[in-house]
Image (tube, rainbow, N blue to C red):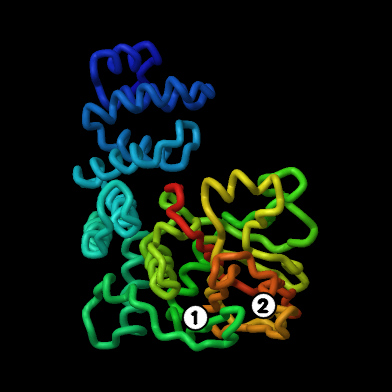
Amino acid sequence: MSQPSVQDIHQRALAGDGDARFMLARLFDREGKHDLAVTWLLKAAESGHVLSQTYLGVRFMTGQAAPFAPLKGAGLLLSAAESGNAEAQARAAVLAAAGVGRAQDWGMALDWLKRSARGGFNDAARQLEVLKAESNFRRPGKPLDLAALVAAPPYAVTVPDPRVRVIEKFASPQLCQWIAGRTQGRLAPARVYDADAGGRSQNEMRTNTGAGFGVSTGDVPIWLARARIAEAVNVPMAFLEPVNVLHYDPGQRFELHYDFIDPDVAHFADDLSQRGQRTATALLYLNDDYGGGETAFPNIGHSYKGKTGDLLVFFNVDEQGRPDKRTLHAGTPPTRGEKWVLSQWIRDRSQPVI
């Protein structure tokens, strides 16, 4: 059977055929005409074409080859999920966990994930396995309840001033392994704030790699970990920046630095005024089978190396909210093996949806 011509696809698209509109959009994408592709995808999505809703929803969520419009993207993904698309249902689970597009609802997140798994989306089934393992680790013998899993275990005061805290067995080994595994194919050189030019750039002081996860790239297990971190620090989850998973090979390091946004650096003024101060840092240790690699605080004579699933929290500002230079710290290089850690920065106000 011969393939339809471009003219035939165009005529069918003009007549309202959703499949043809999707095909035409893909043709425009191949030619680099992404604006036209978005126009046709939007026409198809608005007429109820589920594949176009899913495809365009993801593009709006990421801003790749489309305007960055996460709330609009969330609406399209929810429509596709309600129409039965299994991939969209897995993404709707994340939206429910994150509270994007609708109020946060862990019960709905779990329901969407189960529906996605029943629809044959293997990634959703794997997420459910991880969540069940986490439930057995935290609440043995009890049914899977994501809202109950958000509660953080009690912490120990490691250093009273400046405030450094540790929560042992914060997460299960299965959850930690899952989070590290999500970086496959996504690791890139880590960057630092550039005091001279503004923005972020690569710098020889930081040689490790990492991968960021937001609403469009994360999953329910990652958002569960984020929510528990917010509970541990006693802030709304909206105050959390996108999470980063960091990887260190032997010899890789992050030299001495502060995590607060320095108000005395002119290039940081816009970031500070728009997004607020970075008040705290949480580090979830995803493995412990490496040598060296401590998080070192030389100004207070303290260092820490967590076991798998332990959480380190330190506050970058004092009780009055002023940057605390005693929190100078470094990620020292592993001497053997690979180090994996989830890094979560926390601000003093709500952050944009990313």
Residue 41 shows up from this direction: yes
Q: Position of residue 157 (x, y in %)?
A: 53, 87
Report the residue at 30% width, 17% height from top: 13
Asked which secondary structure carries label 2, the reply is strand
Residue type, label 1: Gly
As drawn, the label of residue 295 is 2
Report the residue at 58% width, 50% height from top: 272
Residue type, label 2: Thr
State the residue in front, 4 or 155.
155
The residue at which mark 1 appears reads as 309
Asked which secondary structure carries label 1, the reply is loop
Outermost front residue: 320
Please give left or right for residue 313 compared with residue 120 in the image.
right
| Mark closest to the chain's N terminus, 2 or 1 | 2
Q: Position of residue 113 (x, y in %)?
A: 27, 60
Q: Position of residue 164 (x, y in %)?
A: 57, 80
Quarter in which the N terminus is drawn: top left
Q: Would you place residue 353 above or below residue 320 in this image?
A: above
Could you tell me how far apart the alpha carbons at marks 2 and 1 are, in whole angstroms?
15 Å
State the residue in front, 280 or 333.
280
Tell me whether circle 2 and circle 1 mark residues in contact (CB < 8 Å).
no
